[in-house]
Amino acid sequence: MTKSLQVILVAVALFAGLVSAEAQTAKKLWRIGYLSASTPAAESVRAEAIRLALRNLGYIEGQNIVTEYRHAEAKQDRVPELAAELVRLKVDIVVRPAMNATKTIPIVMMGVGADPVETGLVESLARPGGNVTGITLLSRELGGKRLELLKEAVPNVARIAVLYDPTIPGILREVKEDLPVAARALKLTIEPWEVRAVDDLDRVFAAVNRQRPGGLYLPGDRVVSAGNRHVDFSLKTRLPSMYQSGRAVEAGGLMSYGADRTDGYRQVAWYVDRILQGAKPADLPVQQPMKFEFLINLQTAKKIGVTINTDVLARATRIIR
């Protein structure tokens, strides 16, 4: 064999090795679809937390994962369209609150308030059975607890305005079935107000203000929480407010009680990792929250003239002073 031929063969072997290495690297670049019903700004905290949790598991944006973000901008009717777009992009996995847009691409729920079995998303919590798994927040079950905490913090409250989006099945059932039972036990009257779109807020705020309830409760954080306008309203009208999300309390709401979101973000990342490593969603049980957080904003309490007793304060997991 001539020296020149040896050089050519070595070069060919090296080129083949580089092509093989590039092919292997390309296979490790996973594409994740991230679908949110809210705005990029409202979703930024959760998206960043999940990104960091994935990074801790070795998934680095631009190196071995690429995330396709889609936001419905608080327009619920856009969600199916955006979900279909992610399906057309052939992402490897979809992360979002809940969906049935595809039966083939794995879906990780990142905090479903409704019972995923009742809504048909999974066959059972222990054995989801299809392409959907993830975490549930038990929001319906916690509605009564939120009313109880609001009553303990503001003993004189008698009527509570509830702002909700009736197009979200889990929240609709909470408002129509669960809250009335809890309210009767606490000797409270709930006054439901439908908010189907952001454009409804001014009209609903004006109507609620005329009724002058003693408190405000928002069971969801989609349309009714768009832009934190509800916080401005509660401060302006000096209404003690209760939420399911701590983000609203950080923005100026009075209290929130719900699943520990930080722990939930780590769980979402765990599901993504397991599925990308070859596990099937059907075999990964849906997880219910193990940790809960109770937030109180004492700055807001002072602004609206509410004094929260020490017993309630002692139960808070975090207090904003």
Image: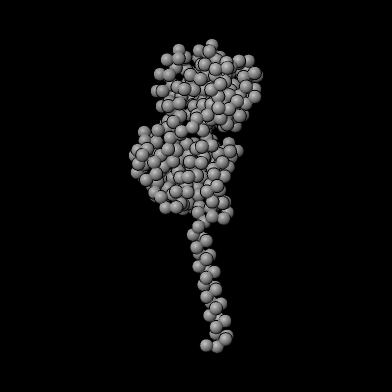
> For the image shown, how many numbered marks are present on the structure?
0
Is 82 placed left or right of 202 in the picture? left
Q: Is residue 50 above or below residue 118?
A: below
Residue 214: x %, y % from top left: 54, 15
Q: Quadrant of the C terminus?
A: top right
Question: In the image, what residue occupies the spot 51% across and 60% down?
Answer: 26
Is 94 placed left or right of 251 in the picture? left
Q: Is residue 103 above or below residue 220?
A: below
Residue 95: x %, y % from top left: 48, 44
Question: In the image, what residue occupies the spot 45% across and 38% down?
Answer: 135
Is 18 placed left or right of 285 in the picture? right
Looking at the picture, the colour scheme in use is one colour
Q: Is residue 297 above or below residue 110?
A: above
Question: In the image, what residue occupies the spot 50% across and 67% down?
Answer: 20
Can residue 304 be seen here? The reply is yes
Can residue 98 be seen here? The reply is no
Residue 150: x %, y % from top left: 52, 19
Question: In the image, what residue occupies the spot 56% across and 51% down?
Answer: 60
Residue 228: x %, y % from top left: 59, 29
Q: Residue furthest top?
A: 156
On the image, which quarter does residue 177 sit in?
top left
